[in-house]
Image (spheres, helix red, strand yellow):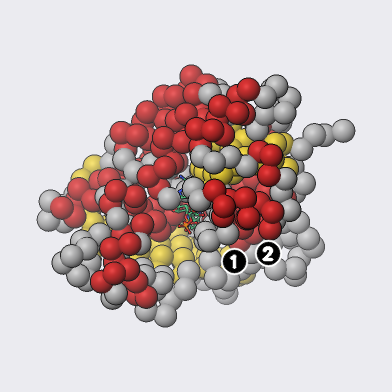
């Protein structure tokens, strides 16, 4: 009988945005059982939340240190095998570093760290540990995003000319215009978010989508950030011009003050033979653009899709899939890797994506600070 993978969770308490998505995603394909963790630093809330979700409290810990030392004292057959880090950004690095060094597999939320230097330290630690590390760039798990990647690999677009990703949200309007909330929101605090708000939060998803779907690497970036109040200069809106090579260019348009927008992530890749367009709010439709043929629409679950895409579709065509399925596909890939089974490299983003992402964030900040100049990403 296949044993479920013992999963620990850090962060993602009842008050969090992302916790439920991870917990549900872990269950969707029957691969994991949650055995414990630290959902929140408030002990009473931590216990209350565990009880609310029906989780025995014997492996709910008061903090991360207590979790690591207690888990390491358990026999390997009982110890957590994978730990998901769902805390605010500044805790990703210290937690991931200690977990990797102690021999745990890690699933980490983006941005992987708060600096590029931390990302490189994690990369070196992982190379020594040989454990699995996955970064939850959630949108890469959608069937139609996977299909996009496979079609581009097959040459459906020919040579790529231009990439355009828009990631617009409006949620920060509610906080940014209130002087108190500007001070207390962790994403607007450089100590907790890192040097960027908008680019580290959503621009980095857009960047990863580009490299995931096209296989191209961004070589340099020119960034223009915006803030609205001089008592908080964190970027809440940012446009990045991208250069892949001399004649292949792109743009990331990201904003958290795009009033009325919800989670409007749209990626369009244009090549010599056609274009591919996907919108996160309508994730079951992949549009194939052409100059001489009518618009085509690909949908999940059909035999015409690639193996990677079909692996992510659980029901017959016509049963819409969403963000829970997308995250579940990432967890499924990680389960295969942890069990040493074969998997496609498109099943989950890795340490390499995390290092690339942190270079993008840091170089975008640098470009903006220097007066919107071109800055090369680290190799
Ligand atoms: N992949 C995605 O699409 C996506 C979407 C949203 C958020 N995120 C990322 O997920 C992370 C969390 O974001 P969020 O919006 O859920 O934040 P949040 O502020 O809503 O929740 C953070 C949770 O972490 C807990 N926490 C804080 N300090 C802790 C500690 N020391 N130990 C244990 N738990 C602790 C809090 O109590 C809370 O439950 C961020 O890094 C964010 O960038 C990713």
> Is 50 on the left or on the right of 210, as rendered?
right
Quadrant hosting residue 93: top left
Is the residue 256 above or below the residue 376 in the image?
below
Quadrant hosting residue 297: bottom right
Residue lying furthest bottom: 260
Is the residue 237 above or below the residue 57 in the image?
below
> Is 224 on the left or on the right of 357, as rendered?
left
Q: State the count of labels.
A: 2
Q: Residue at the location (19% across, 51% down)?
A: 367
Mark 1 vs ligand 1: CB under 8 Å? Answer: no
Residue 71 pos. (x, y %): 62, 29
Q: Secondary structure at mark 2?
A: loop
Q: Residues within 10 Å of mark 1 (few under 14, many from 20)?
A: many
Q: Residues within 10 Å of mark 2 (few under 14, many from 20)?
A: some
Q: Residue at the location (51% across, 37% down)?
A: 64
Mark 2–mark 1 contact, CB under 8 Å? yes
Q: Can residue 181 be spotted in the picture?
A: yes
Q: Mark 2 to mark 1: distance in Å?
A: 8 Å
Q: Residue at the location (70% across, 68% down)?
A: 320
Residue 228 pos. (x, y %): 22, 71
Quadrant hosting residue 121: top left
Residue 100 pos. (x, y %): 51, 28
Quadrant, the C terminus? top left
> Is 146 on the left or on the right of 360, as rendered?
right
Residue lying furthest right: 1
Q: Nearer the viewer, residue 190 or 238?
A: 190
Quadrant, the N terminus? top right
Q: Going from the N terminus, do you reach mark 2 or mark 1 first?
A: 1
The residue indicated by pointer 2 is 321
Q: Residue at the location (54% across, 41% down)?
A: 62
The residue indicated by pointer 1 is 283
Q: Secondary structure at mark 1?
A: loop
């Amino acid at each position: 009988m296949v044993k479920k993978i013992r999963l620990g969770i850090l962060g993602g308490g009842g008050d969090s945005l992302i916790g439920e998505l991870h917990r549900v995603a872990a269950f969707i394909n029957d691969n994991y059982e949650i055995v414990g963790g630290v959902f929140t630093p408030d002990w009473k809330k931590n216990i209350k939340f565990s009880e609310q979700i029906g989780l025995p409290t014997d492996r709910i810990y008061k903090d991360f240190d207590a979790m690591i030392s207690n888990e390491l004292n358990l026999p390997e057959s009982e110890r957590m095998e994978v730990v998901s880090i769902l805390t605010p950004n500044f805790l990703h690095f210290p937690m991931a570093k200690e977990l990797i060094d102690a021999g745990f597999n890690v699933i980490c939320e983006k941005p992987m760290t708060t600096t590029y230097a931390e990302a490189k330290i994690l990369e070196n630690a992982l190379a020594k540990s040989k454990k699995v590390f996955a970064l939850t760039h959630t949108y890469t798990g959608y069937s139609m995003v996977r299909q996009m990647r496979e079609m581009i690999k097959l040459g459906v677009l020919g040579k790529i000319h231009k990439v355009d990703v828009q990631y617009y949200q409006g949620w920060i309007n509610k906080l940014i215009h209130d002087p108190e909330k500007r001070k207390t929101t962790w994403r607007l605090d450089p100590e907790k978010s890192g040097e960027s708000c908008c680019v580290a939060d959503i621009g980095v998803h857009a960047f990863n989508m580009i490299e995931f779907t096209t296989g191209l690497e961004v070589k340099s970036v020119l960034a223009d950030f915006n803030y609205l109040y001089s008592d908080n200069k964190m970027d809440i809106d940012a446009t990045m011009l991208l250069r892949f090579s001399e004649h292949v260019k792109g743009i990331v348009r990201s904003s958290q003050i795009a009033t009325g927008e919800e989670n409007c992530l749209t990626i369009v890749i244009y090549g010599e033979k056609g274009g591919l367009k996907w919108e996160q709010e309508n994730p079951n439709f992949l549009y194939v653009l052409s100059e001489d043929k009518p618009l085509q629409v690909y949908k999940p679950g059909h035999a015409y899709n690639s193996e990677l895409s079909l692996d992510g579709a659980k029901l017959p065509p016509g049963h819409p899939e969403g963000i829970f399925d997308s995250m579940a596909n990432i967890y499924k890939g990680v389960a295969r890797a942890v069990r040493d089974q074969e998997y496609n490299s498109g099943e989950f983003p890795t340490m390499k994506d995390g290092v690339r992402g942190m270079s993008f964030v840091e170089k975008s900040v640098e470009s903006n600070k220097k007066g919107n100049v071109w800055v090369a990403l680290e190799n």
